[in-house]
Amino acid sequence: AIARRLDRPVVLVGMMGVGKSSVGKRLAAILGCPFVDADEEIEKSAQMTIPEIFANYGEDYFRDGERRVIARLLGGNSPRVVIATGGGAFCNAETRALILERAIAVWLDSDLDTLVERTSRKDNRPLLKDGNPREILARLREERRPAYAQAPIHVVSSSGPHVNTVSKVIQGIG
Ligand code: S3P
């Protein structure tokens, strides 16, 4: 029933490590629609990895590419899609406005320990390289909260299995 009513893309926003991609994939499978990872799309269109984009061109350039990629993903005529965004996407005013206008934004939040644990599994986040990851995550989480809070749906992702979070998202959008 949810799947039939869904007439806009579902866009997952929230901090690095909260599980946007994992939850997004499972959610898309349940809804029977495609899943797209915006970070992967940026890497494809730039033909570079995200750390390379940051290192060679800087964050502003990355944000610009991120906005264009998300605009393209939301501009297609298939509304049935689940999109995971990079953690900073929804904190860019233009990108946020675009998402709020064309999609259902779902803010996935979790406690700091969970973010620290999940981001430590992969070494692919340039913003965590220049200092203590826990401190950086704590600061970004506070700074970004007002932006994330503009998403109409809030879901707390606990440290447990992602399926629990997926159910909460489905309740939220249903
Ligand atoms: C970023 C999060 C990353 C990626 C880039 C910047 C951020 O995505 O877009 O490293 O500003 O929070 P994930 O949230 O998927 O890690």
Image (tube, rainbow, N blue to C red):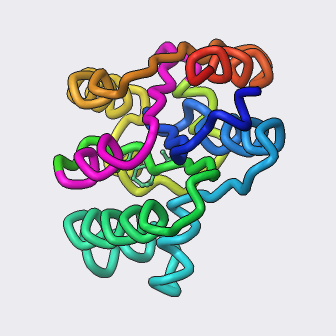
- In the picture shown, does residue 136 fall above or below 60? above
Quadrant including the C terminus: top right
Q: Position of residue 33 (x, y in %)?
A: 75, 51
Q: Residue drawn at (48%, 49%), measured in percent from left and top?
A: 85
- Quarter of the image for residue 31 reads top right
Quadrant including the N terminus: top right
- Quarter of the image for residue 37 reads bottom right
- In the picture shown, does residue 33 fall above or below 154? below
User: Of residues 15 and 163, which is closer to you in this image?
Assistant: 163
Farthest residue, direction bottom: 47
- Quarter of the image for residue 121 reads top right
User: Of residues 7 and 156, which is closer to you in this image?
Assistant: 7
Q: Residue drawn at (47%, 72%), measured in percent from left and top?
A: 42
Q: Position of residue 60 (x, y in %)?
A: 20, 66
User: Of residues 141 and 173, which is closer to you in this image?
Assistant: 173
Q: Position of residue 66 (x, y in %)?
A: 36, 65
Q: Residue drawn at (51%, 61%), measured in percent from left and top?
A: 39
- In the picture shown, does residue 20 fall above or below 152? below
Q: Residue drawn at (69%, 54%), measured in percent from left and top?
A: 35
77 left or right of 52? right
Part of the protein shown in magenta = 94-114
Residue 46 lies within the magenta run: no
Q: Position of residue 65 (x, y in %)?
A: 33, 72
